[in-house]
Image: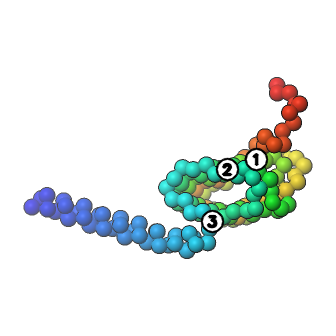
């Protein structure tokens, strides 16, 4: 009798988790059709090596690194749209790109470390973060480094 009650408890708990998971999945169905990338429960590194003409992505319970350091921007102003829920997003950009942030945070954090320099291109990042973090770091891209500059 006791094992039967335990089994029923586990079945009920499994059914509740199943219904919640199904609801979350269906709520993100609209996002999957709007965004170019929908990432769920992954740790992924996305590298743009060629030309970047903008992108949009939605992530849920993921750890994503977006590397734009070796890319050429298709236009002078480009757009990156991000929606993250319980995720970590790290964006690496070339040092010659200016970043303009627009968005909202709920229980989230945004950290941007960029040095002042002559900016030639603009990256607009539209974001909506919920229980997530976003870091933006400028790195010297390999294509733009001076080969004659000495290290040290």
Q: Residues within 10 Å of mark 3 (few under 14, many from 20)?
A: few
Q: Nearer the viewer, residue 44 or 100?
A: 44
- Residue 147 picture location, percent across and down: 86, 33
Q: Is residue 76 visible?
A: yes
Dot 3 falls on a residue whose secondary structure is loop
Q: Please report contact status of discs 2 and 1: CB closer than 8 Å, yes or no.
A: yes
Q: Is residue 68 visible?
A: no
- Could you give the CA–CA distance between mark 2 and mark 1, rounded to whole angstroms? 8 Å
Dot 1 falls on a residue whose secondary structure is loop
Q: Farthest residue toward the top?
A: 152
Q: Residues within 10 Å of mark 2 (few under 14, many from 20)?
A: some
Q: Is residue 122 left or right of residue 32?
A: right
- Could you give the CA–CA distance between mark 3 and mark 1, rounded to whole angstroms? 21 Å
Q: Nearer the viewer, residue 127 or 123?
A: 123
Q: Which mark is residue 36?
A: 3
- The quarter of the image holding the N terminus is bottom left
Q: In terms of sequence position, does the residue under pointer 2 or pointer 1 come before the other?
A: 2
Q: Is residue 85 left or right of residue 119?
A: left
Q: In terms of sequence position, does the residue under pointer 2 or pointer 3 come before the other?
A: 3
- Residue 55 picture location, percent across and down: 69, 62
Q: Please report contact status of discs 3 and 1: CB closer than 8 Å, yes or no.
A: no
Residue at horizontal 49 percent and vertical 55 percent from the top: 41
Residue at horizontal 51 percent and vertical 59 percent from the top: 40
Which residue position holds label 2?
A: 47
Q: Which mark is residue 70?
A: 1
Quadrant of the rendered structure where residue 121 is?
bottom right
Q: Which mark is residue 113?
A: none
- Residue 52 picture location, percent across and down: 75, 57
């Amino acid at each position: 009798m006791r094992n039967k009650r335990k089994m029923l408890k586990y079945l009920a708990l499994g059914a509740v988790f199943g219904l919640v998971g199904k609801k979350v999945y269906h709520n993100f169905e609209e996002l999957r059709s709007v965004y170019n990338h929908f990432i769920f429960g992954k740790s992924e590194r996305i590298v743009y090596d060629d030309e970047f003409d903008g992108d949009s992505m939605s992530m849920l319970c993921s750890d994503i690194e977006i590397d734009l350091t070796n890319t050429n921007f298709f236009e002078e102003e480009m757009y990156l749209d991000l929606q993250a829920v319980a995720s970590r997003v790290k964006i690496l950009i070339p040092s010659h790109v200016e970043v303009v942030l627009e968005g909202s945070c709920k229980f989230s954090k945004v950290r941007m470390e960029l040095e002042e320099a002559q900016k030639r291109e603009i990256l607009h990042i539209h974001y909506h973060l919920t229980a997530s973090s976003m870091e933006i770091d400028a790195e010297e891209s390999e294509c733009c480094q001076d080969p004659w500059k000495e290290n040290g």
